[in-house]
Image (cartoon, helix red, strand yellow):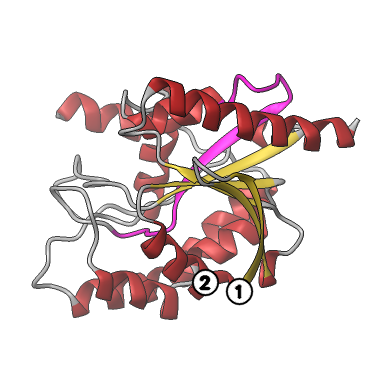
Amino acid sequence: MENRLQAIHDIVLPSDPINSQLEELYRKLWHSYEKICAVHTNRQLSNIYLLTVPEEFIKAKIKILILGKETQGWGGEFKDAPSITELRQLYKLYVHEEKGNQAAFMRFVQWILTIHDGIEVLPDNIIKIGKKSRSGHYRSVAREQMNILPVVQEEIRIINPDVIICPTSNIRVYNEYLTSMFGSYTEQVLHDNLWVSVRRYDTIQEIPVIICPHPQGKSTDELNVVKYTIAKYIKMIYDKRK
């Protein structure tokens, strides 16, 4: 564990305008995060999931933000409450240098990079505060995040992705939180049977949001069809940028 902590603290964070804006955002909203934690001291909460954006993403032809639901036990390496810097160092180490783990979500993230050389991906989560020692989240905590901690909306404004992808195994929960953050939407179905669609939300009309099945639990054949459908749509966007 000590080696792990040292590796985290050795990470150097970038200081470009995008990352500087994220740092400023997190500091501005930190009090709201602490307020949520103080209200829910009877629950074992994970640390908040904070991003670091690599240079290759900033310069990419197509920037894709992929939104999972929540991250299990994020920041569990720290004995005490970590700082903003430490959480962003952890993100840079785990996501960009270690390339995540072998979970289905992270394998899906890495697959998106293979669609085209000009594409870069940034993993994020709709729920920023999950459970400390297991998967899942507390609904009341998530709703408070939507009400007083608009961190995801602000991250999207700063990062300005070209596409957002939401892989989910629970569309009801996703619908509740996405609608809470971005308002109502129109939808274009890309594949009926495997539930792949593109949405345009009221407050982020310019960014297509791809809703698709979570890769975990899908058969290889089904997942290949999902991937083909997504890749076809993203290549169409890429070709329009030429």
Q: Position of residue 148 (x, y in %)?
A: 42, 79
Q: Tell me the element at label 2.
A: helix
Residue 75 falls in image quadrant: top left
Q: Can you tell which mark lies on residue 194?
A: none
Residue at which label 1 appears: 184
Whether 28 is drawn above or below 85: the answer is below
Q: Is the Cβ of the residue at disc 1 closer than 8 Å to that at disc 2?
A: yes
Whether 47 is drawn above or below 13: the answer is below
Q: Position of residue 236 (x, y in %)?
A: 79, 34
Q: Position of residue 131 (x, y in %)?
A: 20, 56
Residue at which label 2 appears: 179
Q: Closest to the observer: 212 or 36?
A: 212
From the viewer's perspective, tell me whether residue 226 is left or right of residue 141.
Answer: right
Residue 241 visible in image: yes
* Amino acid type for the residue under numbered disc 2: Thr
Categorize mark 1 by other alpha carbons within 10 Å: few (<14), some (14-19), many (20+). Answer: some
Give the residue drawn at x 70%, y 21%.
116
Question: Where are the magenta residues, as a range?
Answer: 112-129
Residue at the outermost front position: 193
Q: Tell me the element at label 1.
A: loop
- The answer for how far apart the CA atoms under marks 1 and 2 are is 6 Å
Q: Position of residue 35 (x, y in %)?
A: 29, 78
